[in-house]
Image (spheres, rainbow, N blue to C red):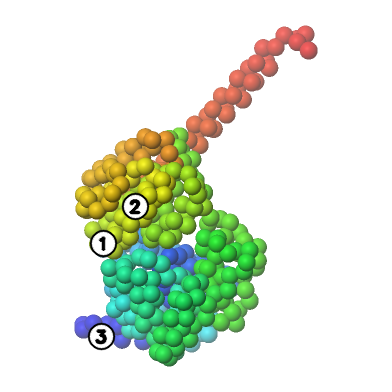
Amino acid sequence: MKQRGVFDIVRSSIRSIPRLSSRGTRGKSSTTQRLDDVFNRRGYDTLTKITGNHPLLIHNGEVHPIERRGPRTTLYENISLIAEFVPELDAYEPDDVAIFENQGITEYTTRLFNQRLTDPDIIVLTNVRQDHTDTLGKTRTDLARSFARSVPAGTHVVSGEQHPVLHEYMQKEIERRGGTIEQVDIPDEHEGLIGSETIHAVNAVLDVVGEPPLPAEEIESFLSAIQPTWIELEDGLIFNAAEVNDVESTEMVRRVLVDDECITPFVYLRRDRRGRTASFAQYIELLFERELIDEAHIGGANTRAFTENVDVPTKCHSQNADPEQVLTELFTDGRPVILMGNTVDEFMREMQASIEQRVKEKRQAASASEAVDISEQGSAEATKPKDYE
């Protein structure tokens, strides 16, 4: 079957269902999942596709993990899923909604997803940050242009990007193409909080479709839960910031955690993310210049090229290295550790599993120690002489 025919069939399957799509640099998966949760709780018949590190299809709250063929995300993994599940939705029910995360990393695939595959009524643009610079553009303005050009005519964009110049640029480009855009309003008390633009984007979507906003306490609870906090291991403090995987978001996380304290960074590289690698090379040099790091640990692909292009002391870990051993080595200097760069890789999944296992072991050791203390206290009480008091 020709490509055009495939897209026409899939698009015709969902054309009578209200459609939402999430796009942007950071927070796409969590925003998509949040939208699914909200609409499902409010009685909508929902079909949601989440890409991310662990791809999922959610139908009315029932989660279907997607077994990806190969390590990379592909646009075409959506086609068979839509064809299978969309017919189960009643196309004539007004309370149906389909929500899709747009995982395109080029202007072409982003536009193809929006215009040929899903044709969304509303696009949630979470933010515009410096990532995929080798495929979407070298600057944030280039990235904003790529996002804006992917918006179909008649689509409304809810934008969480707060930079006024970028918003004005996207507004002109989107309106010129027959779309509309609004900028998410973040209240003063939530300014600077990680994820504030995404949770308030959900409220903006609810307003567009005539639904009441999220309760204030739900927003506060969500924001409180996603602010970064250190994970305490026996070896020291660690935080996995690799999931945010752009330098601006990584720096936001670092500032929340340590501000001016020296850290040990572990940057994991992927061969197919050259633009991201270049961005993190600049970021590591900046941290070193500001005396916020003394050394950087580098893992993954092309580590030698990375180290040759930065004027920073580095220690390289091969792609075949044992994640458990690497984790131990990161704590050698006794500083807090921040993982960064890329997370969609088997090595990083194993690294995260090692962290979780060490957290579990620390808790078990603490529980065992507490039990021993209680037992010893009980024994001491039992052996006191009768006339002790």
Q: Which of the two marks, 3 or 2, is nearer to us in this view?
A: 2
Residue under pointer 1 = 274
Q: Which of the two marks, 1 or 2, is nearer to us in this view?
A: 2
How far is disc 1 from disc 2 in space, using C-alphas?
17 Å
> Where is the N terminus found, in terms of image quarters?
bottom left
> Where is the C terminus found, in terms of image quarters?
top right
Whether residue 79 appears in this view of the structure is: no
Amino acid under label 3? Arg
Task: Report x, y in % for residue 166.
Answer: 44, 76
Amino acid under label 1? Arg
Q: Around disc 3, counting alpha carbons within 10 Å, would you say few (fewer than 14), some (14 to 19), or many (20 or more)?
A: few
Q: Residue at x 38, y 75 (%)?
A: 141
Q: Given contact means CB atoms under 8 Å apart, are the residues at marks 1 and 2 in contact?
A: no
* Sequence-first disc among 1 and 2: 1
How far is disc 3 from disc 2 in space, using C-alphas?
46 Å
Q: Around disc 2, counting alpha carbons within 10 Å, would you say few (fewer than 14), some (14 to 19), or many (20 or more)?
A: some
* Sequence-first disc among 1 and 3: 3
Task: Report x, y in % for residue 202.
Answer: 54, 72
State the residue lying farthest toward the front: 289
* Sequence-first disc among 3 and 2: 3
Residue 77 in the image: above or below residue 368 = below
Q: Residue at x 38, y 49 (%)?
A: 289
Left or right of 365, for residue 207: right
Task: Count every numbered label the image shows and give the total.
Answer: 3
Residue under pointer 3 = 4
Task: Report x, y in % for residue 186.
Answer: 58, 70
Label at residue 285: 2
Amino acid under label 2? Glu
How far is disc 1 from disc 3 in space, using C-alphas?
31 Å
- Please tell me whether mark 3 sits on a helix, a strand or a loop: helix
